[in-house]
């Protein structure tokens, strides 16, 4: 059973799963636009690639059905393996088409690939919630966040280099191989033959509003909407700022891509340790202040008429590591407010809230920078970070164990008391 795994095996499993999903996603969203531009596609066509991300915004719609079909960890394992094998198959299929002549077909296949990737993510998130104890969640989410940053580094950096060596079709075979290799650690999950309780109310789309009716849900949504606000604007405007400062495309690719993402991965690994060491509330406040320091540093640089080359490196390192720390915190606290039997649904809803707010902030930051300039934008981002740090004691209330709707009692890290079919309407099912 998965519960018998030691912590290091759990962390390795989670790292591999999130690495498997993030490498192809990074490749399709960052490398494919470069290849398309090399094929002389218009910027409007390249912009259509944003459509492939839609499944990740809408994944909460099918998350309840995955939860309903997964009474045990072994069922989530099936969803992950099935999704990843199909994901790899679609990636291989894309390799048989050419961007120069089959753009529409490739877009449709990419959307399908992202549907499968989002499905894997729902099951992986739910599995992580179920296998990690309260004390392991900070480190476990370090692996999730680090896997995403490492996948971005490989997908946007290494694979772009390999494209020039291997070509389109062979590169996609390599990409599919990454996906399949990364799910091998799932063999650690043994079939769970213990009795499981199926809830009287079946999980479905009607369970989504129930998340927002939980005690403290409004405060949590507000907190998740704000926690990234002081960083997303900087990340969105960092590359345009570097362009305006006179950096070449190659310099930007290395500094903001490889160099910055490396610090992101390192920050994610450190974040889990700090959350465990300081406690979540204190760590989140300090992460927000650290992000404010990054914003102040960027504002100081933006005030200068000529940016010294050496200054951009610590600035990028600060911003990316601050973003990684915040990401690890978001992933960790989102595991608190989940209900039994709807782990994938509730976790997905919280992550989507933070991502949607990030998109809105990114759009607004561009308009704001046009009006008040980069220095003004970065100064506002610093103020937002300080405000989040000050408001954290009120906005963030730690939930111990599984959350609950108002007035409803639930179990906290204890298995539910099973009752015989004659004495209760609960159904007891044995996984065979």
Image (cartoon, grey):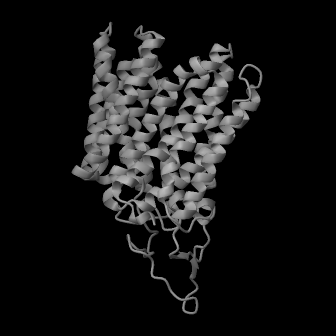
User: Viewer-proximal residue, 43 or 145?
Assistant: 145
Note whether 294 is above or below 416 in the view shown. above
Question: Residue drawn at (51%, 38%), measured in percent from left and top?
Answer: 22
Note whether 419 is above or below 390 in the view shown. below
The answer to whether one can see residue 274 in this image is yes
> What x and y, as percent, mark residue 324?
37, 37
User: Viewer-proximal residue, 385 or 236?
Assistant: 236
Question: Residue drawn at (50%, 54%), measured in percent from left and top?
Answer: 186
The answer to whether one can see residue 353 in this image is no
Note whether 194 is above or below 37 in the view shown. below
Question: Residue drawn at (32%, 17%), measured in percent from left and top?
Answer: 312
Quadrant including the C terminus: bottom right
* Residue with the most extreme left position: 278
> What x and y, as percent, mark residue 47?
64, 25
Question: Residue drawn at (65%, 34%), measured in percent from left and top?
Answer: 51
Which image quadrant for residue 262?
top left
> What x and y, as percent, mark residue 325?
33, 40
Which image quadrant for residue 40?
top right
Q: How many marks?
A: 0
> What x and y, as percent, mark residue 364?
49, 30
Note whether 354 is above or below 47 in the view shown. below
Is 407 positioned to the left or the right of 432 in the image?
A: left
């Amino acid at each position: 059973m998965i519960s018998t795994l030691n912590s290091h095996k759990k962390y390795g499993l989670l790292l591999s799963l999130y690495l498997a999903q993030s490498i192809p996603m990074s490749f399709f969203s960052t490398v494919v636009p470069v290849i398309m531009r090399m094929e002389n596609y218009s910027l409007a066509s390249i912009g259509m690639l944003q459509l492939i991300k839609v499944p990740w915004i809408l994944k909460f719609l099918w998350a309840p059905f995955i939860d309903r079909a997964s009474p045990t960890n072994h069922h989530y394992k099936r969803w992950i393996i099935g999704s990843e094998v199909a994901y790899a198959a679609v990636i291989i299929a894309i390799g048989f088409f050419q961007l120069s002549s089959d753009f529409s077909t490739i877009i449709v296949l990419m959307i399908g690939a992202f549907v499968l990737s989002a499905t894997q993510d729902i099951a992986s998130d739910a599995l992580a919630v179920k296998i990690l104890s309260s004390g392991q969640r900070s480190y476990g989410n370090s692996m999730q966040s680090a896997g995403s940053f490492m996948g971005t580094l490989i997908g946007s950096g290494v694979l772009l280099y390999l494209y020039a060596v291997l070509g389109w079709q062979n590169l996609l075979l390599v990409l599919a191989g990454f996906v399949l290799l990364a799910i091998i650690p799932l063999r650690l999950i043994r079939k769970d033959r213990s009795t499981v309780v199926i809830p009287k109310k079946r999980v479905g789309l009607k369970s989504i509003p129930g998340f927002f009716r939980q005690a403290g849900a409004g405060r949590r949504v507000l907190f998740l909407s704000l926690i990234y606000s002081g960083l997303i604007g900087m990340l969105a405007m960092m590359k345009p700022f570097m362009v305006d400062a006179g950096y070449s495309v190659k310099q930007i690719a290395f500094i903001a891509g490889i160099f910055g993402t490396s610090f992101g991965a390192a920050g994610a690994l450190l974040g889990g340790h700090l959350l465990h060491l300081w406690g979540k509330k204190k760590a989140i406040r300090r992460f927000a202040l650290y992000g404010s320091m990054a914003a102040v540093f960027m504002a100081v640089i933006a005030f200068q008429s000529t940016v010294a080359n050496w200054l951009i490196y610590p600035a990028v390192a600060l911003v990316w590591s601050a973003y990684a720390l915040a990401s690890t915190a978001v992933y960790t606290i989102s595991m608190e407010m989940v209900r039994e039997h709807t782990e994938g649904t509730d976790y997905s809803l919280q992550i989507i809230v933070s991502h949607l707010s990030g998109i809105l902030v990114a759009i607004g930051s561009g308009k704001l920078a046009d009006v008040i300039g980069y220095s003004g934008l970065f100064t506002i981002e610093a103020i937002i970070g300080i405000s989040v740090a000050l408001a954290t004691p009120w906005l963030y209330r730690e939930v111990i164990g599984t959350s609950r709707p108002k007035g409803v009692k639930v179990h906290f890290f204890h298995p539910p008391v099973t009752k015989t079919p004659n004495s209760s309407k609960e159904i007891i099912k044995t996984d065979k």
